[in-house]
Amino acid sequence: MQKYQEFIDSKFKLVSIAAKRCRELRSGQKPRIYVASKNTARIALEEIKAGAVRFENLPPIKKKLIDESQGTTDAS
């Protein structure tokens, strides 16, 4: 994962982005760079490495805590 560390901070995020790009390639989208492979996973990873795949980091979701004694929610 060292090649992707500059812009992807976790291997789970890398897998998620690559899986989505694999689905796009399998549904008929053309590769954005030349890769001497027919394997969609290899193509997706090489595209990510080359910076040809755009993605957005979203802020974390705030969870609501439920006060069990009163049955109300508290947005902390």
Image (cartoon, rainbow, N blue to C red):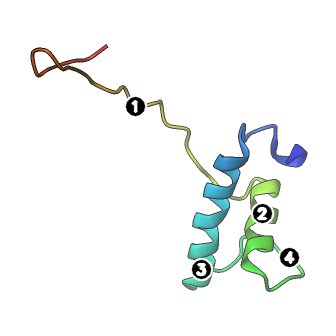
Q: To which residue does mark 4 refer?
A: 35
66 over 8 or under it: above or below = above
Residue 63: x %, y % from top left: 34, 27
Residue sitting at x 11%, y 22%: 71
Q: Which residue lies at the image location 49% right of the left edge and 36% below the top edge? A: 58
Seen at 85% across and 48% down, the residue is 1
Q: Which disc number belongs to residue 29?
A: 3
Whichever of labels 1 and 4 marks the residue nearer the N terminus, that label is 4
Point out residue 69 in the picture as x, y percentages from the top left corner.
Answer: 14, 15
Residue shown at 62% from the left, 65% from the top:
19
Disc number placed over residue 20 in the picture, else none:
none
Instruction: Answer few, some or many: residues within 10 Å of disc 1's Cα (few below 14, many 20 plus, some between 14 and 19).
Output: few
**Rendered location of residue 27, percent (x, y):** 54, 83
Q: What residue type is labelled 2?
A: Leu
**Residue matched to label 2:** 45
In x, y percent, where is residue 2?
89, 44
Disc 2, SS: helix
Q: Which quadrant does the C terminus fall into?
A: top left
The three-letter amino acid code for the residue at tag 3 is Gln
In the rendered image, which residue does mark 1 sit on?
61
Relative to residue 57, is residue 33 drawn left or right?
Answer: right
**What's the CA distance linking mark 2 and mark 3?**
15 Å
Relative to 74, say whether 26 is above or below: below
Amino acid type, mark 1? Ile
Sequence order check, earlier mark of 2 and 1: 2
* Among numbered discs 1 and 3, the one appearing first in the sequence: 3
Q: Element at badge 1?
A: loop
Q: Residues within 10 Å of mark 3 (few under 14, many from 20)?
A: few
Number of residues whose C-alpha sits closer than 10 Å to that of mark 2, classed few (under 14), some (14–19) or many (20 or more): many
Q: Distance between the residues labelled 3 and 4?
A: 14 Å
Q: Nearer the viewer, residue 65 or 25?
A: 65
